[in-house]
Image: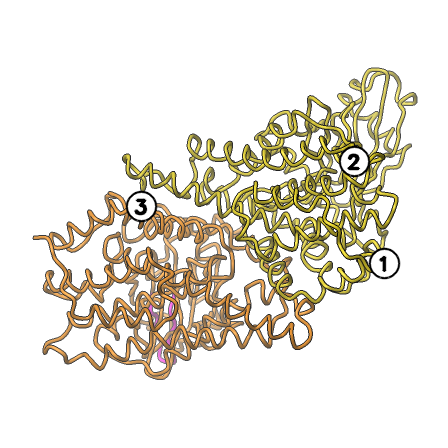
Chain colours: A orange, B yellow
Amino acid sequence: MTEAQAGDYRILHEAALRDYLAGLPDIAARLGNEPVSWSITEVGDGNLNLVFIVKGDRGGIAVKQALPYVRLVGESWPLPLSRAHYEFLALSKQAELAPGLVPAVLHHNDGLALTVMELLEPHIIMRKGLVAGTRYPRFVDDITTFMARTLFFTSDLALSTAEKKEAIAAFAGNHALCKITEDLIFTDPYRIAEQNRWTAPYLDALAADLRDDMELHVAISRLKLKFMASPEALLHGDLHTGSIMVTESETRVIDPEFAFYGPMGFDLGAVLANLLMAYFASSGHERVPGERREFEGWVLETVEQVWNEFARKFLDLWRTKAGGDAYPVSLFSGEQGAARLEIERQAYMQRLFTDTVGFTAAKTIRRIFGLAHNIDFELIEDPKQRAISEARAVRLARAMMVETGTYRTIADVTGAARKLRDWMPELSN
Amino acid sequence: MTEAQAGDYRILHEAALRDYLAGLPDIAARLGNEPVSWSITEVGDGNLNLVFIVKGDRGGIAVKQALPYVRLVGESWPLPLSRAHYEFLALSKQAELAPGLVPAVLHHNDGLALTVMELLEPHIIMRKGLVAGTRYPRFVDDITTFMARTLFFTSDLALSTAEKKEAIAAFAGNHALCKITEDLIFTDPYRIAEQNRWTAPYLDALAADLRDDMELHVAISRLKLKFMASPEALLHGDLHTGSIMVTESETRVIDPEFAFYGPMGFDLGAVLANLLMAYFASSGHERVPGERREFEGWVLETVEQVWNEFARKFLDLWRTKAGGDAYPVSLFSGEQGAARLEIERQAYMQRLFTDTVGFTAAKTIRRIFGLAHNIDFELIEDPKQRAISEARAVRLARAMMVETGTYRTIADVTGAARKLRDWMPELSN
């Protein structure tokens, strides 16, 4: 946010928003008819912001305005408005690198922490579709293009160090949002914290186990340090299935307000963790035992393809678009050099996979024992059934975090998930 | 450099410098007598800057002014004046964290890229002392205090992520200096580059070997990536024995213009590499074979103590001053937690040692095949003898970089160095 605009902030509720939008000729033209006739609906179901859908007779828009506090909690938890600035920066960069895979920005006002975007219709939040058992045939191709391109082109493989360091600095100020992740994902679920919750009483013993599990605490602390101090690429920073809007033929990644330069495995792990949770939750949504088996097969296949297609696309970019300062081609000339660099590319991907396995686990555990849960599990009405699904996910996550090195391929992950499909945990009661 | 001052820059040669200093009451008072009587001598023997020693009847000062190009090469290689700003920032932080181990800053002018410091007298550049075979009994304690404190207190173990990210951003603009390191240390010595040189013809075959050694190219590329994108702590960035001034009772670290947030092992490796080069060069400075054996023993003992004392002090700080966001103590409560955290501290130091081994090797090879050489070797008059010393250092460095994991302790390094003391390489001719 620029100094000049910092004083302009005010929360725009319906009437003020209508006036504000009426003053933007391009937006008003896109909506059509008279401002007084526009319908304005507040639809924000996230944790942080106001989100309005505005419709006129010609078209619609989405308006997102940051609040100076965490909406979920209230004014007692302040949060900088500058996150709207970083979200706008990230959206702009993502639009450039992955055209068509993020909503188009129509207007942005740093002072108001407000962004006007195209209305995504009839897209729905992917998580809701997964809860309903819907398959998305475009998803693998779109999300892997999004991740491969946004991560590769903001990494040292594509950028000069001068460009990279300036980009890191440009996002460094978004640390309050990173801190939320550091606390809620990498710390609180492993200790007593007021905001933690879980499916009680069934998971009480498991929650206590996690708090006493020092191998797990070392593993999560290493991941936390990697999250804090490994600016490998520009991350979305919150890439769960609630940040992805889909139809059967389109995918849009939204809400990058947690964007910063961090470890690539964190974005990958977010996608994989949320697919795996959809998988483990699935049996809890069955009306007839086994009716969602086919859907579950699709989810695990999607898990495999997300990693495999991501790796294939990322490697292709590295082979053809490497203009960065890392791994200079001049050190790998000739046939022998090219062959050796190719082996190193594979080793690099293996290291990235190992990071991804760890972050996948971290993103899972926080949704079951931390502050923010997800509807995959929450909509399982029978708490005991919910606890069973959650315990299966936690069992895999714990193993992935502590025995990370034994998961060498994505098939090792899906194989382990498959084995846990009908595993019956011991529950507290 | 602030905008307002950016236009003020002019190179201050003797007369202009005298006038400028005369206008600074505190400086003038420190020098005593009339400005016209001050002696002003340009003594810059580094590669980048002007350095003046100014003396009056009461005292002396050192004045360093950055030139807008690389002094060693000339105006054809421009270099931002802003490095003086980063050097001042780093000196200030180091003075706060390691009081008494850096020169006191008496005046700084960002617009002129000029810093006035206390005159270090009778200190000499440590490298010169090592060439002469002088031992420095204070060195281990001082340099390990400097490194342990500057690295620990700027790391995630001591800082909140908000503080850390703001500090990273504050130094991000110094990327032109980092680029010099990236090119001259991590790239050029391993490929044909105009500025490379070595002791020809004796090392011609070895130079060609390095250019074809793909295992080495992978290893140096991994180290380069770590250098570029692992902002673990505020590094000095150029911590060789030419950046350390000593007497038998005092140590001062100077010239942190390459300061940035990078991997801790890079500073540690700089110190160790330059000690090891002093060791390998030593026999080349003997007038009577074996006369410097005792000195060489002291050098290797110093190598061991530098790592061991650094590790001890760093761990002590971690145990007693950990206020940062990494490894939160709340995850390691109770006796069992404390014990597990202590094991993890040792594992952390082992990872840092592995990094250090790699960077030590990188800092060695660049001094033998790259642009910037050092007088440890250069002052060995007989080029064949010089080549023998250099080949021994390279043999160790190559092994340390490619078989890094086999060097588990600092004694593994000094043991290997000892074995190479009288090894006779095959030379080209």
Foreground of the two, A153 or B203? B203
Asked if residue B410 is positioned above or below residue A92 in the image, the reply reads above
- Say yes or no: labels 2 and 3 on the same chain: no
- Dot 1: few (<14), some (14–19), or many (≥20) neighbours within 10 Å? some
Asked if residue A272 is positioned above or below residue B350 in the image, the reply reads below
Asked if residue B330 is positioned above or below residue A44 in the image, the reply reads above
Tell me how many marks there are.
3
- Dot 3: few (<14), some (14–19), or many (≥20) neighbours within 10 Å? few
Residue type beneath disc 3:
Glu
- Say yes or no: labels 2 and 1 on the same chain: yes
Foreground of the two, A315 or B369? B369
Query: Can residue B1 be seen at all in this image of the molecule?
Result: no
Inter-mark Cα distance, 2 to 3: 65 Å
Q: Quick one: label 2 or label 1, which is nearer the N terminus?
A: 2
Q: Which mark is residue B201?
A: 1
Asked if residue B388 is positioned above or below residue B321 in the image, the reply reads below
Give, as a single range, the part of the protein colored magenta. A52-63
Percent of width and height locating residue B63: 79, 32
Q: In the displayed structure, does residue B363 sit left or right of residue A361?
A: right
